Amino acid sequence: MTCDQARDLAAGYVLGALERSEEAAVRAHLATCDQPHPEFGELGSVVPALLELDESELVEPPTALRDRIMAAAAADLAARGEQMSAAPAAPAAERAITFPDAGDRARRAERREATRASRFDWALRIAAVLAIVAIGAWGLNLQGQLDRARTFDQAVVAVVHAAGQPGAKTVILSPQKGQHGAGIAAVAADGSVVLAMQDLQATTGTQVYTAWVIVGSNAPVSLGDFDVDAGGTRGFTTKPTTAPAGATIAVTLEQNPGNTAPQGPIVSAGVAAAPPGSSG
Amino acid sequence: MSSGDDADRAVLALVTAGQLDALQELYDRYRVMAYSIAFRITTDASLAEDVVQDAFLGVWRNASRYVEARGSVKTWVLSIVHHRAVDAVRRRRPTAELPEREDIPPAALTLPDVWQEVSSNLDRAEIATALATLSDVQREAIELAYWGGLTQQEIAERTGAPLGTVKSRVRLGLLALRRALGGDEGRAESLAGDAPS
């Protein structure tokens, strides 16, 4: 396909009005062409506006549709976990988490409360945790850092142990944009948060990482400080707290220990999720 | 970006991490728009349900492919719904040329880095006003393409207009819409060229 042919098809492409074979040819051209094609961006920029339907055109889907989608996604997650156990995948893409505003936290808390008895099985969460163990071990082993892998594995074992207790919640901590540090955590039966973190930047001087819990629209509450050596992996158990399902667990990098409100950047964060039927 | 966009990206990050309840939250945010788009295109409640399920499973499996620079999470999700709905109605047509369902990923998941929305917070009334600035034939061509799921060739056959004319109507209609929505930065005229409308 030439550039002129691609330009001729640009309007049809952005509207999805080409035969799919033509669409694939355009996509292949754009992926390999070293000439700029601003017409696609300019024509495509208005397409999102077309998606804004009039209020009279909005239709509520049947409630059963949510169940079908979640059941299918849970089955997909289980299959994915089995595959990753056999052949670990590459690390996931960069993720961004920020402290939610009060409204978001309240809505999220409400949502977690409303959906606590959702359709996916607790066993799937364990499978996901085990899959993440495999991913962590794989990534570290690739770097020839077996000692760090062992440290991380030990931390993950502690998380899995805590996650298996009645009433426990799990958290997947994802790095904020531009930050390093991912991990998993479990809110144990006694309220302590057991963390297994990796890829953290080493602390220097008086720097510490601080774990926080945010419940509903409340202010973040410090759960304790920890340092990290050059290995970047760390297991840490916080003091007991109250972290119901829907609570946000976050880790910040602070310049000094003992802060009672976050001063430094959020490095990693996730939301506590409870298994169905638990007390939250 | 609005705070809603930030919150959407945070939810999508959790979807990428494999959190099912994040997928449920994303679904709850956009279920009405998604289903309404699918229903408008397919005009079939059962098929619209299949489309929305298919689309959200696509989001679940491909959340890591979302690129912030291409537009909002909302647009990304709804574009996938739109694309799958168009596939569904084309599959119903006996003469449609369509690959098997899983042959290629939907374009909404693989589009190059060219999408910049004219605005992330467009008002419906502004959009209606902008659409009113299009000529009847431009609006018809865009409507048949975007909501009817017709290809430009099929629009030409249905309206009796030459294919080149249909292409021009679609292109000039989009450019007029862009101007009306304030997204034109002076390139529209050069793009419009001297094509007939």
Image: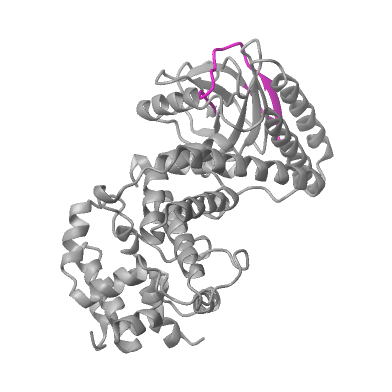
Instruction: In this rendered view, identify the residue nearer to me: B12 or A178.
Output: B12
Relative horizontal placement of residue B166, taking residue B101 as reference (left or right): left
A148 or A172, which is in the foreground?
A172
Residue A86, given in percent of the width and then of the height, sits at 82, 47
- When the figure is inspected, residue A167 is found, relative to residue B174, above or below; the finding is above
**Horizontal placement of B170 versus A151: left or right?**
left
Is A158 in front, or is A205? Answer: A158
In this rendering, position of residue A120 left or right of residue B35: right
Most common SS among magenta residues: loop
* Residue at screen point 44% across, 86% down: A5
Horizontal and vertical percent position of residue B167: 33, 82
Q: What is the quadrant of residue A228 in the picture?
A: top right
Residue A237 covered by magenta stretch: yes
Q: Is residue A252 above or below residue B152?
A: above
Residues in magenta, as a range = A226-250
Query: Is residue B10 visible to us here?
Result: no
**Residue B184 image-quadrant placement:** bottom left
Expressed as whole percent of the image width and height from the top left, the position of residue B197 reads 23, 84
Q: In the rendered image of this protein, does residue A36 appear above or below residue B104?
A: below
Q: Residue at x 37, y 48 (%)?
A: B33
Answer yes or no: is residue A146 visible. Answer: yes
> Which residue is drawn at the image coordinates 31% and 60% (left, top)?
A50
| Residue at image point 31% right, 82% down | B166
Classify B150 as above or below A250.
below
Question: What is the quadrant of the C terminus of chain A in the image?
Answer: top right
The front one of A56 and A122 is A56
Q: Is residue A34 magenta?
A: no
Whole-percent x, y for residue B6 in the image: 41, 41
